[in-house]
């Protein structure tokens, strides 16, 4: 009887309490909780498209209508130039796609911790999983919207060059550009709930100061470094270069500055998120 009890005890899971263990194994735990990442991402996708009238078509209709408005206002009424000989609508959509991915990722991730308050207050796991999983919905919308891009290129008979192979790299760069600020904002949102109302303003303001509805060539050379402080400038310019090639050249100054800003916000966002992470369960 005693030996059976001893054997059974060896089969039971052992809980190890070690000071600083969570911090020491934090990045390893991210990989261990990858199934939770998949579950949360799939749940968000299911909720987004469940019981909807137009479903995934919304991911196509919204950027298409925005492209039409920008083309009419900036290209038609304002008479702003396109990138070389590229059709204005194609130039606009090539800038709108990465911006929409950034904006949707920022919006989804910034509210993710508050939206998962019950899970965070009861179970331990690296909280970084939650905002990262929330960005998957924006990525799926982006992939669906690529259908419009393909349709526009066929309609205008505009064939991309070999640089189109680098499009996934700039897609990843757009996600990283959104991840840093969203981690900082979602951490602040847990402590100060009114921060969720500033996010739509940031997104709306950023749309008009980013080269979405206009070409970066309209920016004077002396202002390019300052202009590059907007992290999405480098992302949008790179995305357009992948699609339009030489018609949309990469401007070295603004591109390099944007990359530095993306890296800074990614480091700052992760560090601030990790600093405030221990208090999430108490504050939320």
Image (cartoon, rainbow, N blue to C red):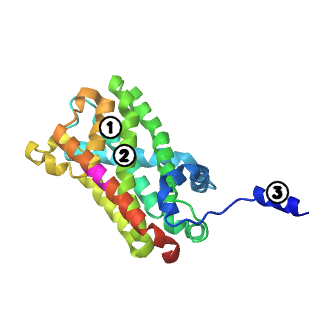
Residue sticking out furthest to the left: 222
Q: Which residue is mark 2?
A: 174
Q: Which residue is mark 1?
A: 239
The answer to whether residue 148 is visible is yes
Q: Which residue is mark 3?
A: 7
Query: Local crowd at mark 2 within 10 Å, few (<14), some, or many (≥20)?
Result: many
Disc 2 from disc 3: Cα separation: 53 Å
Describe the element under mark 2 as helix, strand or loop. Answer: helix
Number of marks in the image? 3
Instruction: Please report the bounds of the magenta region as a residue range.
Output: 261-265
Query: Local crowd at mark 1 within 10 Å, few (<14), some, or many (≥20)?
Result: many
- Camera-nearest residue between 253 and 200: 253
Give the mark nearer the N terminus: 2 vs 3: 3
Describe the element under mark 3 as helix, strand or loop. Answer: helix
Give the mark nearer the N terminus: 1 vs 3: 3
Q: Nearer the viewer, mark 2 or mark 3?
A: 3
Disc 1 from disc 2: Cα separation: 9 Å
Q: Residue at x 77, y 56 (%)?
A: 11
Q: Measured from the top left, where is residue 96 in percent x and y?
A: 35, 45
Q: Nearer the viewer, mark 1 or mark 3?
A: 3
Q: Main secondary structure of the magenta part?
A: helix
Describe the element under mark 1 as helix, strand or loop. Answer: helix
Q: Residue at x 61, y 55 (%)?
A: 43
Disc 1 from disc 3: Cα separation: 61 Å
Q: Residue at x 39, y 70 (%)?
A: 188
Q: Mark 2 and mark 1 in contact (Cβ < 8 Å)?
A: yes
Q: Measured from the top left, where is residue 206 in percent x and y?
A: 29, 56
Give the mark nearer the N terminus: 1 vs 2: 2
- Camera-nearest residue between 78 and 121: 121
Q: Residue at x 51, y 67 (%)?
A: 19
């Amino acid at each position: 009887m005693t030996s059976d009890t001893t054997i059974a005890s060896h089969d039971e899971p052992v809980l190890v309490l070690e000071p600083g263990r969570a911090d020491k194994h934090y990045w390893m735990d991210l990989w261990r909780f990858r199934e939770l990442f998949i579950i949360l991402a799939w749940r968000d996708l299911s909720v987004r498209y469940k019981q909807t009238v137009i479903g995934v078509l919304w991911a196509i209709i919204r950027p298409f209508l925005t492209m039409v408005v920008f083309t009419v206002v900036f290209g038609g009424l304002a008479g702003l130039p396109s990138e070389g000989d590229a059709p204005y609508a194609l130039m606009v959509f090539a800038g709108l796609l990465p911006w929409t991915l950034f904006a949707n990722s920022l919006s989804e991730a910034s509210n993710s911790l508050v939206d998962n308050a019950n899970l965070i207050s009861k179970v331990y796991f690296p909280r970084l999983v939650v905002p990262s999983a929330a960005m998957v919905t924006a990525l799926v919308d982006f992939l669906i919207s690529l259908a419009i891009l393909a349709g526009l290129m066929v309609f205008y008979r505009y064939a991309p060059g070999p640089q189109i192979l680098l499009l996934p790299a700039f897609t990843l760069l757009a996600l990283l550009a959104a991840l840093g600020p969203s981690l900082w904002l979602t951490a602040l949102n847990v402590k100060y709930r009114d921060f969720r109302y500033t996010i739509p303003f940031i997104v709306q303001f950023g749309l008009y100061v980013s080269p979405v509805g206009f070409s970066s060539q309209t920016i004077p050379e002396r202002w390019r470094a300052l202009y590059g402080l907007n992290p999405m400038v480098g992302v949008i310019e790179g995305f357009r270069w992948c699609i339009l090639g030489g018609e949309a050249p990469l401007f070295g100054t603004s591109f390099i500055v944007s990359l530095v800003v993306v890296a800074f916000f990614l480091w700052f966002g992760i560090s601030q998120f990790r600093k405030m992470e221990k208090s999430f369960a108490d504050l939320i």
